[in-house]
Image (cartoon, rainbow, N blue to C red):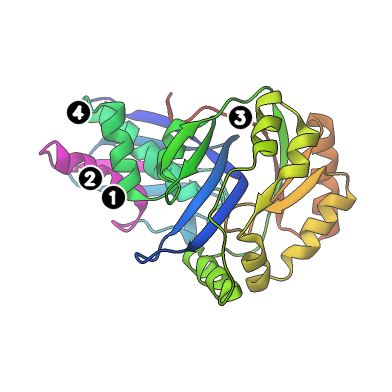
C-alpha cells in the first residue's frame, strides 16, 4: 500500500477576462489573464477499495461528494489512460471560496490529478497532465501551472507571463454562489444584437504585470463578465463600492463571481481594506492574499 499523497493548489484571480461571442459549440473564445493567489486547497489521495470523496472547510456542504466532483473525474480520467481502477480516497481541505469565481473546483481537479499520479506512480508527463486538465475544464490547466498566464481558446491554451513583483489582494466572499454557465448565458443576453469584439490581452496590463506595477495594473483590470454577474447579483455593486471607499486601488468581480477582488498597494493596506469591507456589512467574510503563487505542488 502506498502512503497518502497531499497536493496544495492555489486559487486564481482573472486580472483580465476578455470574452468573445458564443461559438457554435457554446463556448466563448477568451483572452484570460490568470494570476494565482495565495489561497489554497489541499487534496490528499490515499489508497482505497473504491473511489471516495470527503471534504472539510467552509461551505463544503455545497460541493458534490460523488463522481460529479471534478476531483473524482480527474482520478477517473488518469486511471482510464493507464488501465488501472480509480480506487482512491480523495480528501479535500477547502480554503478557496466555493462557487466564488476563484477556480476552487478546478483547483481540486488539478490537485487530485497530481496526487493520483504520484500515488499510483503513473509517470504521466506534464503534457499528458495538461491534456487531461483541458478535458476537465477551461480553468483546470492554469490551476496545475500557477504563476501568471494568458489563456486563449476557452482559457485552456496557456502562455506563461512574467510578473515583476508581488501584488496584494483582498477578496470579499458573498452569500451563496453563482453558476458560471448562468453568468455566460446572461453575458449572451446582455450582448445580444451587438457586435462582440474578438478578445485580446491588454498590452498595458501585461506591461504592468511584468513591471510589478500595482497602480498600472489597477488602471488596466477588466472583466467582461462583470456586468452579467452584477445583473444576476446587483448587491455585489455595494461590495465593490465599499472596497474602493476603503482604499483599494481597484475592484472587480473575480471571474464569474460572486467573490469580489480588490487590488491594494501593500500588505498593511490589505488588512485595513479587509477590516473595513467586513464592517460594511456587504460581504460574509474577507480573505487577504498575495500573488503570484505556485501551481499545484506536492507537499
CB within 8 Å, label 2 to label 4:
no
**Percent x, y of residue 78:** 22, 40
Taking the image as drawn, is residue 14 in sight? yes
Marks 2 and 3, Cα distance to the nearest angstrom?
29 Å
Q: Residue 251's mark?
A: none
**Percent x, y of residue 67:** 28, 56
In this view, 66 is above or below 92: below
Q: Earlier in the sequence, mark 4 or mark 3?
A: 4
Marks 1 and 3, Cα distance to the nearest angstrom?
27 Å
Q: What residue appears at the point 19 percent right and 42 percent down from the top-left corner?
A: 87
Marks 1 and 4, Cα distance to the nearest angstrom?
16 Å
Q: Residue 122's mark?
A: 4
Q: Residue 77's mark?
A: 2
Quarter-of-image position of residue 257: bottom right
Apparent side of residue 218 relative to residue 173 in the rendered image (left or right):
right
Taking the image as drawn, is residue 116 in sight? no
Q: Residue 292's mark?
A: 3
In this view, 288 is above or below 19: above
Q: Residue beneath label 1, please?
A: 73
Mark 4 or mark 3, whichever is nearer to me: 3
Q: Earlier in the sequence, mark 2 or mark 3?
A: 2
**Percent x, y of residue 91:** 38, 42
Q: Secondary structure at mark 2?
A: helix
Q: Which residues are the magenta region?
A: 66-92
Marks 4 and 3, Cα distance to the nearest angstrom?
29 Å
Neighbour class for label 3 at 10 Å: few (<14), some, many (≥20)?
many
Mark 1 or mark 3, whichever is nearer to me: 3
- Quadrant in which the N terminus is drawn: top left
Amino acid at each position: 500500500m502506498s502512503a497518502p499523497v497531499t497536493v496544495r493548489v492555489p486559487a486564481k484571480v482573472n486580472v483580465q477576462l476578455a470574452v468573445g461571442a458564443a461559438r457554435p459549440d457554446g463556448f466563448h473564445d477568451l483572452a484570460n489573464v490568470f494570476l494565482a493567489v495565495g489561497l489554497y486547497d489541499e487534496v490528499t489521495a490515499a489508497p482505497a477499495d473504491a473511489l471516495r470523496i470527503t471534504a472539510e472547510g467552509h461551505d463544503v456542504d455545497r460541493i458534490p461528494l460523488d463522481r460529479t466532483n471534478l476531483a473524482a473525474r480527474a482520478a477517473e480520467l488518469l486511471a482510464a489512460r493507464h488501465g488501472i481502477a480509480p480506487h482512491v480516497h480523495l480528501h479535500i481541505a477547502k480554503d478557496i471560496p466555493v462557487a466564488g469565481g476563484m477556480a476552487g473546483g478546478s483547483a481540486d481537479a488539478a490537485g487530485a490529478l497530481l496526487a493520483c499520479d504520484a500515488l499510483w506512480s503513473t509517470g504521466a508527463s506534464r503534457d499528458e497532465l495538461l491534456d487531461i486538465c483541458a478535458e476537465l475544464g477551461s480553468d483546470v490547466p492554469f490551476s496545475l501551472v500557477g504563476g501568471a498566464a494568458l489563456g486563449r481558446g476557452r482559457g485552456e491554451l496557456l502562455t506563461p507571463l512574467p510578473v515583476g513583483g508581488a501584488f496584494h489582494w483582498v477578496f470579499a466572499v458573498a452569500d451563496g454562489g453563482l453558476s458560471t454557465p448562468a453568468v455566460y448565458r446572461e453575458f449572451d443576453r446582455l450582448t445580444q444584437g451587438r457586435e462582440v469584439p474578438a478578445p485580446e490581452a491588454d498590452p498595458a496590463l501585461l506591461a504592468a504585470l511584468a513591471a510589478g506595477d500595482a497602480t498600472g495594473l489597477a488602471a488596466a483590470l477588466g472583466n467582461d463578465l462583470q456586468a452579467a454577474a452584477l445583473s444576476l447579483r446587483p448587491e455585489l455593486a455595494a461590495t465593490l463600492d465599499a472596497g474602493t471607499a476603503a482604499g483599494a486601488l481597484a475592484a472587480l468581480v473575480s471571474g464569474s463571481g460572486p467573490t469580489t477582488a480588490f487590488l491594494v498597494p501593500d500588505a498593511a493596506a490589505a488588512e485595513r481594506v479587509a477590516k473595513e469591507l467586513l464592517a460594511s456589512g456587504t460581504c460574509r467574510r474577507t480573505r487577504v492574499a498575495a500573488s503570484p503563487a505556485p501551481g499545484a505542488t506536492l507537499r
